[in-house]
Image (cartoon, rainbow, N blue to C red):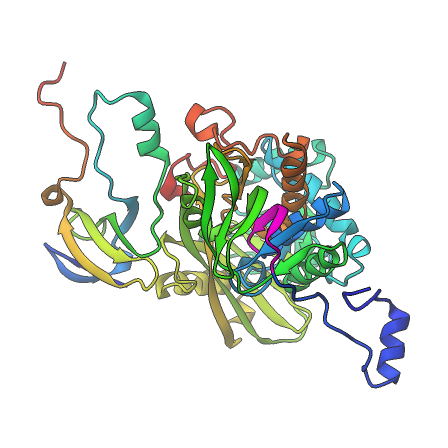
Amino acid sequence: MFGSGRFSGLRVLKEGLTGNKGWTPHWRDPEPKSEYDVIIVGGGGHGLATAYYLAQEFGLKNIAVLEKGYLGGGNVGRNTTIVRANYGLEGNSQFYSHSLKLWEQMEQDLNYNAMMSQRGIINLFHNDGQRDASIRRANAIVNQGDDAEIIYRDDLKKLLPYLNFDNNRFPIMGGLMHWRGGTARHDAVAWGYARAADQLGVDLIQNCEVTGIDVEGGKVTGVQTSRGPIKAKKIGLAAAGRSSQVAAMAGLTLPLESHVLQAFVTEGLKPIIDHVVTFAEGHLYISQSDKGGLVFGSYIDYYSSYAARGNLPMVEHTMETLVAMVPSVAKARLLRSWGGIMDMSFDGSPIIDKAPVEGLYLNCGWNYGGFKATPASGHTFAHLVALDRPHAAAEKMRLDRFRTGRGIMDEEGTGAQHNLH
Amino acid sequence: MRITCPICGERDMREFTYRGAALPTPPLEADVETWVDHVHLRENAAGVLRELWQHTMGCGAWLVVTRNTITHEILDVVLAEEAGIGIPVAEEQP
């Protein structure tokens, strides 16, 4: 058996006592074969999860994941690790609910420690309007079968005593707590899916850039890559911020713009922030990693970018908002900041659908929310690729909603327009 | 990023508001499909992109900025009206 065998607490103990000499690589490094039944383009969280579910649930055997860099080197390793199902709109609601259920069983399914931590996520509100919107959203979350609790100021002061409750402009009235939300170790999610897919026989092929998609008579026949041509009956694209370039190889233009979203982490501090906390004004979200670093971010930079790094105005905005919400961390030193390339759709919701080329499937438009979607994205995309019909939880993620106007999922209510999400 | 407004000179990007790709507006009589594509679909270039910015906290002019989306280097800035980008004004209002 490849993939370093089965992990267990007992094995950690045994390896620890015998010099840790029994560990082997988590997955093989195979040469690409000349033909596969299914090729997934993109070895990030979504692509790896898709390959895993194709093999595990849908019984496909001849699958490859093609990754131009290394596994998990894109957004799955660049996010703020938040997991949640606190959506309110039909379409998103059932999808993220499905995703959270998969998160809760992921570590057992994959035999991998993803450090899933359901520490709760709380969205703070500052005024009557936001409170009413939060109550409405809480009811929607409860109706979808998940958990939500409105916590008002007095109780919140006991739970989150470090917040600045009396900020002059944005006093805190309360928050919407979603207790089953939390964080997971982002890299481990990619590695866990990679290892489990590899154990099921999926070929994970790294340093293999797709340079062309072969289409004959309106049907895909394979791909050209930096490691030679590979034939395939079906091709699933899970290329996130690079989706437009990959889809263009099949002659498609997508309703996407790629933008940069920055994230930040401080030096390690003693435990202060026990949950994931979001500040409504300024769109700040923060949690504390197990190493003690505060992990936080806010808006995208709001201009097209493939640079994977941002500019200072949004750095400044994010720091200002953090200090407005938690003044006590003002002197914490920032350790690192980085950017990820977000595939922004213009209603802010994703696309999991067939492309208008037979045998080609699209998984894109994850905006700034791809990480929490990882298991459901993989699961429902695998369903679509294997069975040629959408999974019930993802049937609203249609490509044609922009054309028809039906089923637009503008969760933020800012308007379905490219520069507003 | 700093953007050189043709009217105001070089300014911090905070003074500007981003709109997106600077696309030629289809003729008003174009069919629905053309308009749907114009509103929704984007080449989303990784490299040189012509895009619309407005100097909202300055002179208010709409600008066509030619910028490399991989390096953030700004290659050219012209007034949108000189670049012929914008909503055509109907010559006779009904």
Residue at image point 63% right, 38% down: A385
Magenta stretch, residue numbers: A32-42
* Residue B71: image location, x then y, percent: 32, 64
Instruction: Determine the image quadrant of residue A58.
Output: top right
| Above/below status of A162 relative to A364 | below
Decide if residue A208 is on the left or right side of residue A10.
Answer: left
Instruction: Determine the image quadrant of residue A31.
Output: bottom right
Res. A361 visible in picture: yes
Quarter of the image for the N terminus of chain A: give it.
Answer: bottom right
* Residue A64: image location, x then y, percent: 63, 53
Q: Nearer the viewer, residue A275 or B63?
A: B63
Res. A154 visible in picture: no
Decide if residue A223 is on the left or right side of residue A204.
Answer: left
Q: Main secondary structure of the magenta part?
A: strand
| Above/below status of A226 relative to A18 | above
Q: Assess whether residue A34 is covered by the magenta stretch.
A: yes
- The mark total stands at 0
Q: Assess whether residue A378 is covered by the magenta stretch.
A: no
Instruction: Determine the image quadrant of residue A287.
Output: bottom right
- The extreme front residue here reads A34
- The extreme top residue here reads B94
Quarter of the image for the C terminus of chain A: give it.
Answer: top left
* Residue A161: image location, x then y, percent: 65, 62
Residue at image point 45% right, 65% down: A319
Q: Nearer the viewer, residue A376 or A243?
A: A243
* Residue A263: image location, x then y, percent: 50, 63
Residue at image point 52% right, 27% down: A407
